[in-house]
């Protein structure tokens, strides 16, 4: 997973708000032990992601047992070279 949306986000600095449908659903499932985490799963999120708050993603990872990598200086759109490297590793499988 790349930058999953876990919760809502509001920024006074940029005057933006982001709220996906059912923003608390992933967290609720994880807290109830009902999130069906794939056996081979990891999450990558940018440290500067304004939609997928790294702290929320890390908490979700702790609840589900999914490894979370916070990409330094990455935003919601992770760098192409970074994602390309992940895909290369995944395809080698």
Image (spheres, helix red, strand yellow):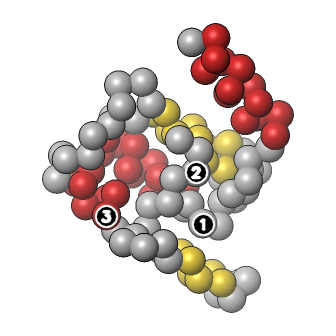
Picture quadrant where residue 80 is located: top right
**SS at circle 2:** loop
Horizontal relation, residue 90 to residue 75: left or right: left
Q: Are marks 2 and 1 in contact (CB under 8 Å)?
A: yes
Answer few, some or many: residues within 10 Å of disc 1's Cα (few below 14, many 20 plus, some between 14 and 19): many
Label 1 and label 3: CA atoms lie apart by: 16 Å
Q: Kindly indicate the quadrant of the structure image that contains residue 29.
A: bottom left
Give the percent coordinates (x, y) of residue 56: 45, 58
Residue displayed at 31% across by 64% down: 25
Q: Residues within 10 Å of mark 2 (few under 14, many from 20)?
A: many
Q: Secondary structure at mark 1?
A: loop
Q: Which mark is residue 25?
A: 3
Q: Is residue 15 left or right of residue 63?
A: right
- Determine the secondary structure under disc 3: helix
In primary-sequence order, the first of circles 1 and 3 is 3
Q: Is residue 86 above or below residue 31?
A: above
Q: Position of residue 75 (x, y in %)?
A: 72, 56
Give the residue drawn at x 66%, y 53%: 47
Q: Which mark is residue 51?
A: 1
Tell me, yes or no, whether the two marked residues, 2 and 3, touch with CB atoms within 8 Å: no
Quadrant hosting residue 76: bottom right
User: Could you tell me how far apart the alpha carbons at marks 2 and 3 are, in whole angstroms?
Assistant: 16 Å
In the rendered structure, find residue 3 and report the number of the disc placed on it: 2
Q: Earlier in the sequence, mark 2 or mark 3?
A: 2
Q: Position of residue 58 (x, y in %)?
A: 45, 48
Query: Does label 2 or label 1 sit earlier along the sequence?
Result: 2
């Amino acid at each position: 997973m790349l930058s999953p949306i876990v919760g809502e986000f509001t920024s006074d600095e940029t005057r933006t708000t982001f709220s996906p449908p059912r923003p608390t659903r992933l967290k609720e499932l994880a807290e109830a032990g009902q999130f069906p985490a794939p056996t081979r799963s990891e999450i990558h999120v940018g440290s500067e992601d304004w939609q997928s708050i790294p702290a929320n993603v890390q908490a979700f990872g702790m609840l589900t047992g999914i490894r979370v990598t916070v990409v330094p200086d990455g935003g919601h759109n992770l760098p192409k070279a970074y994602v390309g490297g992940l895909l290369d590793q995944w395809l080698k499988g």
